Image (tube, coloured by chain):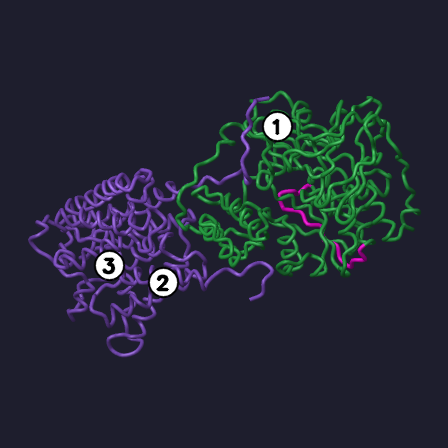
């Protein structure tokens, strides 16, 4: 018999999950939306994505060195932050926009709170909102999709012609006859890189759902609440809203499945997650219908992020043997 | 609850084998929950297998019997699987294996036994809960309130272990007779035999053998911790044991199948509890077995009997892998609560580094009690014990599931155990 036996506390078994495995799985699930974005908007979108990721990774290393924390740049979390930030930028964003955004996301959104798991706000959204507040012009100028559906359209220089997103057009009272639900679903519209192709996003979300990394509680309640609100409070009186348009446009699907479900910044219990999802939905719908922005996904999620500790406090699970 | 990898296939079809008589046994005076027993034999005494060598102290305690015949050569501190080290009576075998008494009792005589007499036999035989908790059984046969339901726990939800399964398959009738005794003793109206669905053979034999209409088999999904007493009660009768209370408060008593078999042997064969079935398994063992082992046998002998080893074990666990205890030496003897000996290789023994909690809530969704282990863990790290108490840590059943599912490998179970101790202080 060996002289030394390992003595450790129980349990002695562990499932095969790890933090970095979960993170890279999320990255994997986001790849279809990225492909779609690059396909739709061209190489400029790819440039934004790469810059977002690389600068997020770089910022992570720099800050971990400065704060003398363990370097954990390969755990995938900074990669996701950079990727999600880039997905939330216009494809024609200038090169410095994703760089500054990623640095803000990692530094102010994450590391300042103590690193992975400690942050209150979703880092990618914190970065996006910072950019929105600082350079609204660049954040709301969208390139026209290069490709219409399957057929290849003649490439246009990305800064030559810009178009409004469907939601902006709606807000400005323009008629949207030319945008069909199918085009919204496939991503043939103006918008941020990662949010336009609903089909690709749903593919990724289905993957996460099947793997058990996300549950339906937040995304479904979020989306249904937005749908219900926009239907009830329609432009031509009660129950006249185009709810499907609202669900398919803007960043709702990207936000509901990939950002509202961020573990760190959303509630722990299923009950809490339902509250969180409904809360996101209400805030989002209110912003879209009566607020100053056409979109509202980022603000809705960030506001509910702030409410997460208090939701956790009031939505504990019932304890076995204790009647409520 | 969560489905675990079972690892039971290597031993579930292996018949119980008797381990050859050990040359020496080390019988600890503490083998049960409660006060340690008082030795009544002295160094130099010759004892027979089944002879009482230590008596129950007042209160919650139990008798202890010699497991082989031979001479007491020492009463000394010896490695103990739970306590690290504890006093043990050392008996050197004379190789004769003389037994004190093994008169079979006639069925008519047994039918005449009063509940009081049955309890006394169980008490004298030193029977404790053999599922792992080792609470003295005679106390559970005398609940302070009347109960109407008896649950026989054959769930065996811990991975690797198959000792209860084999007993159910090989000793079905004996267990049923044991159940008769306990049911009579408690005066219950209903008996449930709870078996997880990963033991179809056991379910089949019981279905075939049961005659009594008060008895019902409940097939449970194989999920962990299905066999936890409180979880079992909720799943079977739909009632929860109130926080801080015991099963009899909802009219239930639950016994492990191994305990029931020991009661059968005590009453029918006059045989005190001095041997039990132990599963010896794990990736290092090439011939895993279910062994009938005398109490006090060092686990080294069990391991040697299953030789040759595929490789040297890096970790030896007594009990199941979820709640069992890692041992520092193979000198530790088998005691009444030893359900299994599991040998892990280097890879399995390697402890994983703790990482930051990402609030994935796998522990929250998995907890069979409804706790929030990740939040409690955060409070414990700051030594905020009272705040942790407000998160109901005293209701934790220490099943280890939160730890098992945690992707950040945080020692959640351990921190809650620690906090419980701090709070009780």
Q: Quadrant of residue A24?
A: top left
> In the rendered picture, chain B carries what hue?
green
Q: Secondary structure at mark 3?
A: helix
Task: Determine the residue positioned at 61% across, 42% down.
Answer: B158
Expressed as whole percent of the image width and height from the top left, the position of residue B420 reads 56, 50
Chain letter for the part of the structure drawn in purple: A
> Is there one chain holding both mark 2 and mark 3?
yes
Please report contact status of discs 2 and 3: CB closer than 8 Å, yes or no: no
Label 1: few (<14), some (14–19) or many (≥20) C-alpha neighbours in 10 Å = many
Taking the image as shown, residue A283 lies to the left or right of residue B5, namely: left
For disc 2, the chain is A
Circle number at residue B329: 1
Please report contact status of discs 3 and 1: CB closer than 8 Å, yes or no: no
Q: Which residues are magenta?
A: B186-201
Q: Which residue is outermost to the left?
A: A160
Give the number of callouts: 3
Residue where numbered disc 3 is placed? A184
A232 vs B264, nearest the viewer: B264
B12 vs A269, nearest the viewer: A269
């Amino acid at each position: 018999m060996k002289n030394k036996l390992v003595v450790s506390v129980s349990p002695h078994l562990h499932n095969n999950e790890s933090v970095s495995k979960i993170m890279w799985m999320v990255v994997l699930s986001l790849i279809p939306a990225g492909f779609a974005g690059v396909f739709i908007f061209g190489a400029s979108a790819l440039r934004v994505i790469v810059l977002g990721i690389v600068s997020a990774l770089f910022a992570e290393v720099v800050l971990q060195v400065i704060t003398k924390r363990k370097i954990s740049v390969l755990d995938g979390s900074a990669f996701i932050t950079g990727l999600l930030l880039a997905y939330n930028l216009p494809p024609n964003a200038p090169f410095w926009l994703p760089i500054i955004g990623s640095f803000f996301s990692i530094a102010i959104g994450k590391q300042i709170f103590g690193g992975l798991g400690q942050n209150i706000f979703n880092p990618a959204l914190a970065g996006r909102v910072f950019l929105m507040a600082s350079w609204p012009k660049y954040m709301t100028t969208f390139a026209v999709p290069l490709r219409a559906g399957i057929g290849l359209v003649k490439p246009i220089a990305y800064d030559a012609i810009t178009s409004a997103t469907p939601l902006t057009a709606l807000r400005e009272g323009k008629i949207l006859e030319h945008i069909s639900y199918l085009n919204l679903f496939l991503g043939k519209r103006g918008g941020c890189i990662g949010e336009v192709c609903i089909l690709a996003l749903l593919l990724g979300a289905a993957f996460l759902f099947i793997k058990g990394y996300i549950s339906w509680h937040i995304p479904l309640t979020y989306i249904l609440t937005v749908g219900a609100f926009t239907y009830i409070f329609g432009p031509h009186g009660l129950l006249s809203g185009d709810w499907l348009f609202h669900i398919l446009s803007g960043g709702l699907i990207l936000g509901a499945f990939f950002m509202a479900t961020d573990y760190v910044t959303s509630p722990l219990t299923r009950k809490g997650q339902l509250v969180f999802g409904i809360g996101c939905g209400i805030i989002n719908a209110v912003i879209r219908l009566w607020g100053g922005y056409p979109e509202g996904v980022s603000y809705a999620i960030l506001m509910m992020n702030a409410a997460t500790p208090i939701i956790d406090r009031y939505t504990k699970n019932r304890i076995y043997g204790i009647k409520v | 609850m969560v489905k675990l990898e079972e690892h039971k296939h290597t031993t579930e079809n292996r018949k119980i084998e008797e381990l050859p008589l050990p040359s020496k046994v080390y019988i600890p005076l503490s083998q049960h929950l409660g006060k340690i027993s008082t030795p009544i034999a002295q160094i130099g005494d010759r004892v027979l297998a089944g002879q009482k060598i230590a008596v129950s102290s007042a209160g919650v305690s139990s008798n202890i019997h010699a497991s082989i015949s031979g001479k007491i050569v020492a009463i000394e501190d010896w490695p103990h699987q739970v306590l690290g080290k504890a006093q043990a009576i050392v008996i050197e075998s004379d190789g004769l294996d003389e037994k004190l008494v093994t008169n079979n009792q006639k069925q008519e005589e047994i039918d005449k036994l009063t509940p009081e007499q049955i309890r006394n036999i169980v008490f004298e035989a030193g029977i404790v809960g053999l599922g792992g908790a080792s609470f003295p059984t005679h106390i559970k046969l005398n609940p302070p309130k009347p109960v109407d339901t008896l649950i026989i726990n054959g769930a065996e939800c811990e991975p690797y272990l198959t000792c209860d399964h084999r007993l159910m398959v090989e000793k079905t009738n004996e267990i049923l007779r044991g159940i008769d005794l306990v049911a009579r003793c408690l005066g219950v109206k209903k008996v449930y035999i709870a078996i997880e669905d990963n033991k179809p053979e056991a379910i089949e034999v019981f279905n075939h053998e049961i005659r009594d209409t008060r008895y019902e088999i409940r097939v449970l999904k194989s999920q962990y911790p299905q066999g936890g007493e409180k979880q079992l009660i909720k799943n079977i009768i739909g009632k929860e044991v109130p926080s801080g209370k015991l099963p009899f408060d909802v009219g239930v008593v639950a016994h492990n199948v191994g305990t029931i078999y020991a009661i059968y042997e005590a009453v029918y064969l006059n045989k005190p509890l001095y041997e039990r079935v132990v599963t010896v398994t794990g990736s290092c063992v090439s011939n895993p077995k279910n062994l009938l082992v005398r109490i006090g046998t060092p686990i080294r002998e069990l391991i040697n009997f299953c030789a040759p080893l595929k490789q040297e074990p890096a970790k030896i666990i007594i009990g199941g892998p979820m709640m069992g205890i890692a041992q520092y030496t193979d000198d530790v003897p088998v005691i009444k609560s030893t359900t299994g000996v599991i040998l892990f290789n280097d890879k399995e023994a390697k402890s994983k580094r703790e990482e930051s909690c990402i609030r994935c809530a796998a522990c929250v969704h998995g907890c069979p009690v409804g706790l929030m282990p990740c939040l409690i863990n955060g409070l414990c790290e700051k030594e905020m014990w009272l705040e942790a108490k407000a998160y109901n840590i005293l209701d934790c059943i220490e099943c280890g599931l939160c730890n098992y599912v945690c992707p950040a490998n945080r020692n959640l179970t351990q921190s809650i155990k620690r906090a419980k101790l701090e709070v009780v202080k």
